[in-house]
Amino acid sequence: MQNTILKLYKKAFQQAWPAWLGGILLGLLNVLEFAFKKPWGITTSESRWTGWFLYALDVQIDKAPQWLYYQQYKTLINPPLLDSGTLIDMGIIAGALISALLAYDFKLRVPAKKSRLAQGFIGGVLMGYGARLAMGCNIGGFFSAIPQLAFNGWVFFIGLLIGGYIGAKLVVKL
Amino acid sequence: MKLKQPMLGLIALTLIFIIIAIYTYVGLIELGIFLLFGLAYGIVLERSRFCFASSFRDLFITKDARLARGVAAGILVATIGFSILMISGIRSAKVLPVGFHTLIGGILFGFGMVLAGGCASGTLFRIGEGYVTLWFALLGTLTGMILLAATWPFLWYNYIKYQPKIWLVDYLGWGGAIALTISLILIYYIIVTLWEKR
């Protein structure tokens, strides 16, 4: 009995699951979340974090016309602990941490080349700008958009292929 | 240290369930369920190392299509499930304005995620795994969002506001929209598989 449990544990937490299984499970979770309330998304709430940050610095994001973005996305309607998307995002970090710990696999991984950190930051800036320009990221604008039968999901997908191709050609040279 | 990790994992898991219990107790069970969804996404993403950035990068660098097929499989499952929910009228689609901003946003995002080594979801789950580079990626993402918000009125009033929301069902009906979507996903699946074998 104990052996069976140990074996199952090893299978679930010490070997990586195949990509097809991950994809199908994420698709199913997305269906469940849509049935529950709304499709999966990540960056709308992340952009609210930046609004809260600016608001804390006394920037009038609720009134000033130049901060239209934050008004359109109802940034101040809920405090952080009541924002459902923030709970999803925090849950993802917590879930990944827990799952890495259960697999003996958590480690503070500092890259050997410090330039990788700058590469991460610059890549992040482009992602943040691009996701909100398109009004959705690889989840809300793609993984959840195509299943909603929305044309914008396919256009974003073509963008991802072009950008991903250019990015791949560049990173092999770095 | 190494033996302690699963213990810490169980403690963290307990903490999350206590937080969910608190949300439920104060009458906000819906938020507790969202946290639970996040937890489930995080576990699946981490266990299967499911990263959209890698799915495109691997395709172009090592010609490994496993993740690309996983992405296609996930979208296929969601398309079937979402369609059932939408046809039965339980949920309705939220369609976004589509135009050059969608394409350029996709290019910037696609380039940025490969450069950073993680997409929006990949960044979050790798933060949980302890990858310091992705902490910088998240910081960059938030910075990029402030830049976008600062330029948003210009983009919105001059362009995005006028772009159409195109829902395939309005043009092709349910059958046509679902058939086209599923066919395109299968075509992508087949193309990446052939590309891998080349």
Image (cartoon, rainbow, N blue to C red):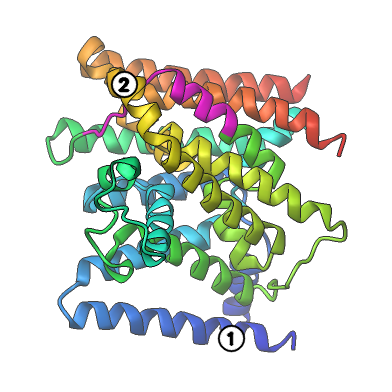
Residue B35 image label: none
Tell me the magenta residue range: B93-108
Label 1 resides on the chain identified as: B
Location of mark 2 (residue): B178
Q: Amino acid at mark 1?
A: Leu
Q: Amino acid at mark 2?
A: Ile
Which element is circle 2 on?
Answer: helix
Q: Position of residue B70 (x, y in %)?
A: 56, 39
Q: Is residue A114 above or below residue B178?
A: below
Left or right for A157, reference B88: right
A108 in magenta: no
- Placement of the C terminus of chain A among the 4 image quadrants: top right
Q: Position of residue B21 (x, y in %)?
A: 28, 82
Which element is circle 1 on?
Answer: helix
**Crowding near pointer 2: few (<14 within 10 Å), some, many (20+)?**
many
Determine the CA span between mark 1 and mark 2.
Answer: 45 Å
Location of mark 1 (residue): B8
